[in-house]
Image: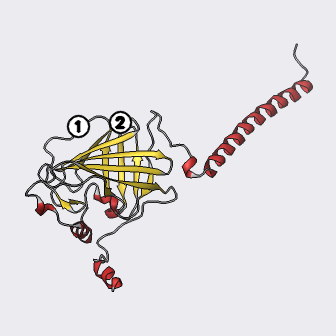
Amino acid sequence: MVLPRNLAEPVEFMALKISSTFWISIAFATALATAAAAQQPPTQRPVPRTADGKPDLSGIYIAPFHALQPVDKIALKPGAEKYKVGSDYSFSLGEHCLPRGVPDTINEPYPIQIVQTPNLVVILYEAGELFRVIPTDGRPHPKDLDPTWMGNSVGHWDGDTLVVDVIGVNDKVSVGEYRHTTAYHVIERFQRPSYDTLKYSATIEDPNVFAAPWTEASTLTLHPEWDIQEYICDENNHDYKQLFERYKQ
């Protein structure tokens, strides 16, 4: 039976009203859930994950200045004492606007930004406007690498840990208080145990310098309210050690 038009119109209107009310309710519930998540303390928010279930490391992080410290005893090979140059050598690289290498650049008092995609991870360093592109698709290091300041990096996932293998670093940079040779090799590990925390460690080896591999580690804090800023080293750059010494007097 076909309803008279004057009866059909209210029925259609009621159906539209019910449908609209349903979608408005869904949108309202979603907005409430989003607002509630935003109001949660960062330590209580879940770690974000990508579509394949891996932790999403994306974000802007910073560590306290000089937070990257050895967790192992550092032993030099006999005859390698000349490679201990002290921390001033690493600072002098910065004074000349030169990169401090891996992992020391992460120890600068400037943030880093991690951008994670399914097949690679990009690290942007505010210090020196440096960057690293780290494939995570299983490819090996290229053959016949020319040594560079930041080396060549390839990564893979070990459970919830991003493991990055670094080789091809030149012998001009240092690690902590030590210079090294082009046999230098670093294994980095990145973990996001909580929403606002990034755990970082670097295992160092150089058979020409160190008697055994050793590890240093630090913890970085997420700052979603920040952006990576422009960093121009050449402009009005100074050696601040003299200024610091003046204030010690």
Residue with the mark numbered 2: 158
Give the SS element for disc 2: strand
Q: Nearer the viewer, residue 21 or 192?
A: 192
Whether residue 5 can be seen here: yes
Q: Tag 1: Cα neighbours inside 10 Å, few (<14), some, or many (≥20)?
A: few
Q: Measuring 18% from the left and 54% from the top, which residue is drawn there?
A: 75
Residue 88 versus residue 172 in the image, above or below: below
Residue 130 visible, this angle: no
**Labels 1 and 2: the sequence-earlier one:** 1
Vertical comparison of 222 with 57: above or below:
below
Q: Mark 2 Cα within 10 Å, few/some/many (few <14, many 20+)?
A: few
Q: Position of residue 133 (x, y in %)?
A: 31, 47
What type is the residue that disc 2 sits on?
Asp
Give the quarter of the image for residue 69.
bottom left
In the rendered view, tell whether residue 68 sits above or below residue 194: below
Q: Quadrant of residue 16?
A: top right
Q: Quadrant of the N terminus?
A: top right
19 lies left or right of 50: right
Residue 64: % across, % down = 41, 62
| Distance between the alpha carbons at the discs numbered 1 and 2 | 16 Å
Look at mark 1 in the image and give the residue it sits on: 140
